[in-house]
Amino acid sequence: MNASSTTPGGPSGSGITCTLSDGIADVRLDRPDKLNALSLGMLGELRATARRLRHEPGLRAVVLSGNGRSFCAGLDLGSAARNPAAVARAFVPTPRGTNLFQEACWAWRRLPVPVIAAVHGHVIGAGVQIALAADLRLTAPDARWSVKEVERGLVPDMSGIRALTQLVGIETAKRLTFTAEEFTGSDAGRLGLAGTVTDTPLDEAFALAGRIAERRPEAVAAAKRLFDRRWSSGDRRTFAAERREQLRLLPGAMRALQRMRGGDAG
């Protein structure tokens, strides 16, 4: 991978940009005049960008953020309402078991590298669900979060129910969903929806991505697989999966250790 390059990740005006630098993908929602509210085209581009990055050689981490004053103010329902046929098509599930709305989020879970969301401003509805699709979240303390769908007569259907129940207790997940109440980034940290609360989420996200990029990529990918696939499995299956991953990693780790020792001896 070149030190700095642009992926084919979003034609001009697609609402999504993606650039690569030193193994880190900088993916941004880029519709700032609409607070990065998601059109159907942006959902498709999110899915496509994640799929392209899955095959990007040398990729070590992804930072997902929003340009302008907000991370994402949710779905652009007005735009969607003008094209009901496209909305209907977007609801049809693929053989993966996800439709377009869900895959725009869950495709990031399938990446073999950590995805870090840096959020600020509005983190509303679909914006929450995109943030929760990341492995790690950093939020500005004054960010405005809300699981907004019920207020609009809908439910969180972009993998949001699954993601919420993974991160918070079921009572908290239900309360946030039933009430659609707004809460701050500081509250999101307290509730467990974000791991870091900071005034500079984007800067710290790139710093974190840089630290991860220094680790052996095969080990990071294996750790992500273990967490994602075995989070709710039984002990015996988890232990067996740990052994399989470790056996694949050990030869390379031993060779690296021998090289280090050889360098010390020299």
Image (cartoon, rainbow, N blue to C red):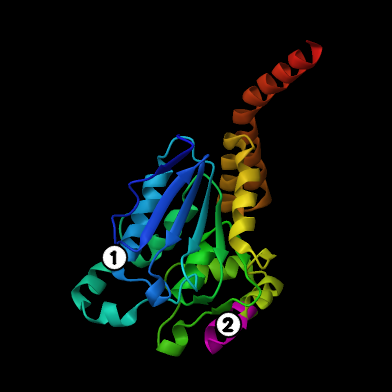
- Labels 2, 1: front one: 1
Say which residue appears at 64% left-offset and 38% top-offset. 214
Q: Residue at x 39, y 56 (%)?
A: 17
Q: Residues within 10 Å of mark 1 (few under 14, many from 20)?
A: few
Q: Secondary structure at mark 1?
A: helix
Q: Which of these two is toward me, 258 or 72?
A: 72
Residue 41: x and y, percent? 29, 65
Task: Indicate which disc, 2 or 1, sits on the residue closer to the N terminus.
Answer: 1
- Amino acid under label 2? Leu
To which quarter of the image does residue 197 belong? Answer: bottom right
Instruction: Point out residue 45 in the picture as x, y percentages from the top left corner.
Output: 33, 58
| Residue name at image x 47 percent, y 71 percent | 127
The answer for how far apart the CA atoms under marks 2 and 1 are is 28 Å
Residue 166 x/y as whole percent:
59, 65
Q: Which mark is residue 41?
A: 1
Please check the rendered image and state whether residue 176 is part of the magenta-colored stretch, yes or no: yes
Left or right: residue 89 compared with residue 198: left
Image mark count: 2
Mark 2, residue position:
176
Q: Which mark is residue 21?
A: none
Magenta region, residue range: 172-183
Q: Check the picture and name the quadrant holding the N terminus.
A: top left
Look at the numbered disc 2 and give the secondary structure of its residue.
helix
Amino acid at pointer 1: Gly
* Coordinates of residue 83 in the picture (x, y in percent): 21, 76
